Amino acid sequence: MRTSALLATGLALAAFATTGCSVLGGEDPADLQVYTGRHYGSEKVFEKFTKDTGITVDILSGDDADLLERIKAEGAKSTADIFMTVSAGPLWNAADQGLLESLDSTVLDKAVPAQYRDADDRWFGLVRRARTVVYDPAKVDPKEFDAKDTYAGLTDPKWKGRLCMRDLSGAYTTSLVASLINLHGYDKTLAMVKGWLANDVEIMGNDVELLEAISAGTCEVGISNHYYLARGQADGELKDVALYWASQQGAGVHENISGAGVVATSDAKAKAQEFLEWLATEGQDDMLEGNHEFPVNPEVPADEAALAFGPFKAMSVDAEAYGQLNPDAVKLLAEADYK
Amino acid sequence: MTQLAILTRRASLRGRPGWSALVLLLAVLTAAPVVSVLLDGATSEARAWPSDLGAMVVTTVLLMLGVGAGTLVIGCGLAWLVTAYTFPLRNLMVWLLVLPLAMPAYILGFVFLSTFDAASPVQQWLRAHVNDSIQVDVSTLAGCAVVMSLTLYPYVYLMARAAFAEQAPTTYDAARVLGASRRRAFFRVLLPMARPSLAAGLALVMMEVLTDFATIQYFGVQTVSYGVYTTFKQSFNFAAAAQLASLVMLFAVVVMAGERLLRGRARYTQRGGRGSGLAPTRLPLVKGLLATGACVAALLAAVIVPVIRLTGWAVDHARNGDGRPALGEGFLQALTNSAVVAVLAALLCVALAVLMGHALRLGAGRLVRSAAQLTTFGYAVPGVVIGIGVLLLLRHLDGALVAVGIPGGTGLLATGSVVAILCAYAVRFLGPAFQAVDASYAKLPVSVTQSALSLGSGPMRLFGRVHMPLIRPGVAVALVLVAIDAIKELPIVLMLRPIGFDTVSAWVHRLATENLWGLAAAPALVIVGLAVVPVAILGRQVRAADRREGGRR
């Protein structure tokens, strides 16, 4: 007993020595503290930025909503300089709660088209992701889709038992429905979602699972973010799944943005603004690398895998609508009993 | 009544104000973060309950019942098997059966679905070889209950085994001598006597079920926690989410009340020190092999097959992946961080739990007992709520410190910190620690405490020389439970970690949310491996206890 008690005390002291030091001071904080909901491979972008500008960056990654709430709870003392998310909703919410600073930047105004940024320039989209229809070309003729309103077309009884969709995890289904509410109004969208469900949609936990189901033949048509398919195909998988740009003869395909804003309590606003400007211009390629999203900057080309899907028209919905209508979308999905 | 008896009664009933105050203080401290969130929520507007709340409540109850029944059957059944019988590999199985604790439910859930759902290799094979119309939906409430039962049964198993091994023998022998069959003696005597321990184990299981949001999401099972999660992450309405979280806590209150009810007024302490242990019967060969098979089946489903699947992905990624190393730069640091935080959290929570147990044993009124019970509710509060609560408290604390002239306050808030994480862990994991320690105290006859006190030993000496040696098994279990939970815990880490501070669970989460299971497989295996360490220590303790009893016989 005595030895194990000693051992435990020793371990505890050692533990404090190692973590305590690194946390309670020691290293100098970097110039910019970025709270980011972007996950994968984002570190490289920050390294490149530091190389280009000499400004050092620390990142704290997490879920959009968690980080938003953390910035709020930290209040005036928050160290966050940049809030970066994978969806427009949290950006809108952060701005709405007064957490983001309005920027005056000709670089950003030029690089980011108006529909991908806040009307008061408190946040800016940086990359775009399209949520569109994917299908099994062996079983589905793309002519079967309604080219005018593809999302609504999936309520047709001919799709009964052939559909797969994503659950409410991630922001994707909710923001799609939010943009549909913006387009069609609440009641019509509710009828549409109920129409999907009436076709015995199978609800899946994530997009990759959904794409694999189509590849395995248990499902014929689904709705997925374009880059999951691009990523799978770049890895040599999912070759038997095809992408269809939705609603091309109508309102266009649904897009969401991943973007960022400068936190109002930041004490490095000039550098933070420089960071956003860099991301929207020279840094665009680095942001896209390996994850096959589309750039917001019209002068920057997308990567090969994303371009392979062909040109498309995007729904000209103000990204602001997603944030504002998100709660309505959640309510609608619950009302339709979408699980 | 003799003079001595009167003295001991007084000594035990009056309690010690200092110790009682300590329990009250702990209760206030652990309740504070949650209360601050609720107050924060109550003062902001726009709080609508989700429209499908009724269905969520029903789903929650069904899932709790399903997992409760599952863990009770598996945990209690296996505990009885390894206690009452010997069969091939039994000594190994006794502690191997604890291993599923090391498997986080969200990892098992993912592996389960990718192995058995309609697009899985299993069903593809069935369609190719048996009938091409086979499409079974396994992402259901039942599937979720199975996965959760498989990862959570060790809670019941541990508690049941301890109860069977420690307190049953004499009574069981008496029942047998009086002519009861083994089955009858088990169901009529042993099981009722193990009730407090089983109830404690089940309460932990229920709380895990209540706060889980990752596994239920995979299976599309919409419990109240799912409501908390979507309200927060989709509507960004934290106030409404916190309000909904209070409903989760209400469920926890019901669970606690249920546990008390199950325990009843009965106090089952053993007479005459440690029992001699149940003399296990050797099973005949065929039955023995069946018993081994039952143990192996549980292990196969909960540990072995998932580990094989994960290893397969990890190897596949290493061979054909896009060249990014699965255990890249910084992973070692994350691993160290996880281990350190787990050790510190375990020591902290168990120290607090032991202090409370000791204080209660020194004699405490209803108020102090309720306060002790209150500290365990943190286990039923979603991690996100505790995380925000700690942040809010730190902000208030810093404000107060600045107001009295300490510039910068604690300085903890600005950076997020390991200290904050440990505070949150203490709030969240004091529950399991206290349950385990308290269960050990419950088996300790009051007369032992009374004798020591009446013979003049002070509280500290009583603790060091009498209580501590006797409650060691409970302390060991508590340490292990907290350490494992701390390794697996995710929301609190994500919410409170300092910049640049990564843990293994956060690492896996980052990859899993992007469905990069090729990359996530190796780190997930490391989580399992890391959690195996405390489990193995616990297993060694279980076996050592076995041997001691064997030697005495």
Image (cartoon, rainbow, N blue to C red):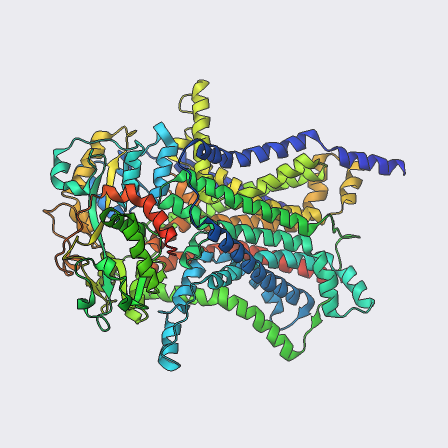
Residue B277: tell me if it is visible: no
Instruction: Please count the marks in the image.
Output: 0
x 44%, y 35%: residue: B41
Q: Quadrant of residue B516?
A: bottom left
Q: Quadrant of residue B456?
A: top right
Residue extending furthest right?
A: B2
Residue extending furthest left?
A: A299
> Percent from the top left, x then y, of residue B543?
63, 60
Q: Nearer the viewer, residue B244 or B504?
A: B244
Against B233, is B80 above or below?
below
Q: Quadrant of the N terminus of chain B?
A: top right
x 78%, y 60%: residue: B171
Residue B463: tell me if it is visible: yes
Residue extending furthest top?
A: B405
> Percent from the top left, x then y, of residue B518?
33, 61
Against B211, is B98 above or below?
below
> Percent from the top left, x then y, of residue B424?
48, 39
Relative placement, left or right, of A96 versus B169 is: left
x 60%, y 75%: residue: B290
